[in-house]
Image (spheres, rainbow, N blue to C red):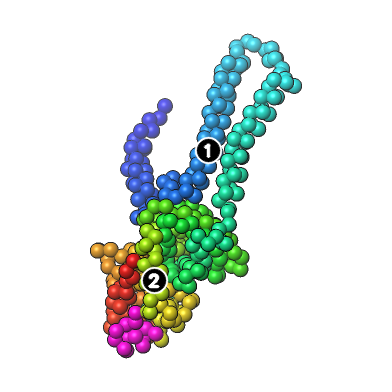
Amino acid sequence: MMNRWPVMKRLLPLLTGLVLLLSACGREDLSTLNPQGPVAEKQLDLMKLSIGIMALVVVVVFIICIYVLIRFRRRKGDKSIPKQVEGNHTLEIIWTVVPIVLLLILGVPTIKDVFGLAKDYSKDKNAVQVKVTAHQYWWEFEYTDYGITTAQELIVPTDKTISFELVAADVKHSFWIPSIGGKMDTNPGVTNRMFLDFPKEGVFRGKCAELCGPSHALMDFKAKAVSPSSFDRWVAAMKAPAVMPADAEIAEKFTSQCLSCHAVGENGGNSAPNLTGIGGRQTVGGILYNDEGVPAEKNLHDWIINPQEYKSGAMMPTAEENSLTPEEVSSIAKYLAEYKLDY
Ligand code: HEC
Ligand SMILES: [Cu+2]
């Protein structure tokens, strides 16, 4: 027999590396196996139940199969025809009833949860209504009861159910926060509904789960669950008058070159992410993380110079196309980095 160990020994570091790489992608957990809310918990319970039943069936079938293969194998010199069991009532009843019982055990909770998770909270006065619009390659969150809109960072209170109305502005996308629950397609022209609860404070990573173009894999967002009082402060801060660049010339450039698409406070358009309080967000564009190593100002600066470099196909012009001088880019990046909301 060939000794395979030397080959395995060479493959082992590669496999270890792969495992580490795959498990260490991203900062917040993207796993459905570590639920942080009741919806994801129910979904995980269903996965466990169905995998449990399947595993049980596989084990039992394999044990019977191996037993039969050994016990009833053809022995040397034995030419006789085995005992025929066709039409055996006991056997037929067993292999009809057992699957029915298994399907019932799987089906009853599945149907109960599928309908339970489809509950419509769109008329519920206690729920926070959020209209999610998916764009290539960013997420817009409109709080219809509060008259505010934000992007890339969904802020939610821990004490209320969030009722989502989901649509797409261009092609089909899919809204998914693995550790909280989901997913649900967003379609152009059709509204889907879903609700989620965020009982724990924290930041949870969301993803587009439907191949939607070259930067599909970069269509990340954050869901940030905060205390009820913090949420109220955030709403108030979002509604406060916009902070514009202090320098009049920069303010004018910003208005003419950026607010044609973007908005801050009550100023600007709505064909691009709302930039109110962008300096306090965890990322720029959902993917460039702001931290000590790379502060928001640097990420904003790099992004404004050439968004396509970080997200190919991003529908934002480069600094050159926006006819900005390097000084103007720096001033705008500094202004946006300092634009933070207190909440
Ligand atoms: C033609 C419309 C358009 C113009 C003009 C425009 N942008 Fe954008 N911008 C976008 C779009 C679309 C995105 C989202 C890209 C993506 O993530 O796919 C974006 C994203 C951004 C982001 C990241 C937002 C976030 O939520 O993380 C920043 C910051 C930004 N733009 C700043 C600017 C600045 C500053 C200017 C003016 C110099 C500007 N943009 C001009 C369309 C525009
Ligand atoms: Cu998408």
Q: Residue at x 38, y 79 (%)?
A: 241
- State which quarter of the image contains the N terminus: top left
Specify the quarter for ligand 1: bottom left
Type of amino acid at the residue the image marks with label 1: Leu
Q: Is residue 139 above or below residue 105?
A: below
Q: Find residue 150 and report its horizontal and vertical position in percent.
A: 43, 70
Number of residues whose C-alpha sits closer than 10 Å to that of mark 2, classed few (under 14), some (14–19) or many (20 or more): some
Question: In the drawing, does residue 328 fall left or right of residue 239?
Answer: left
* Extreme residue in the top direction: 77
Q: Residue at x 55, y 63 (%)?
A: 165
Q: Is residue 222 above or below residue 333?
A: above
Between 65 and 169, the one nearer to me in the picture:
169
Q: Find residue 101 and report its horizontal and vertical position in percent.
A: 63, 31
Is residue 247 within the magenta segment? yes
Q: Which residue is mark 2?
A: 236
Q: Find residue 260 and report its horizontal and vertical position in percent.
A: 45, 82
Type of amino acid at the residue the image marks with label 2: Ala
Which span is picked out in magenta? 243-255
Q: Using the image, tell me which numbered label, if any, was put on residue 97.
A: none
In which quadrant of the rendered view does residue 4 lie?
top left
Number of residues whose C-alpha sits closer than 10 Å to that of mark 1, classed few (under 14), some (14–19) or many (20 or more): some
Q: Which residue is mark 1?
A: 49
Between 160 and 156, the one nearer to me in the picture:
160
In the image, which is nearer the foreground, mark 2 or mark 1? Answer: 2
What element does badge 2 sit on?
helix
Question: In the drawing, does residue 108 fall left or right of residue 340?
Answer: right
Between 324 and 198, the one nearer to me in the picture:
198
Question: In the drawing, does residue 196 fall left or right of residue 82?
Answer: left
Q: Residue at x 42, y 66 (%)?
A: 152
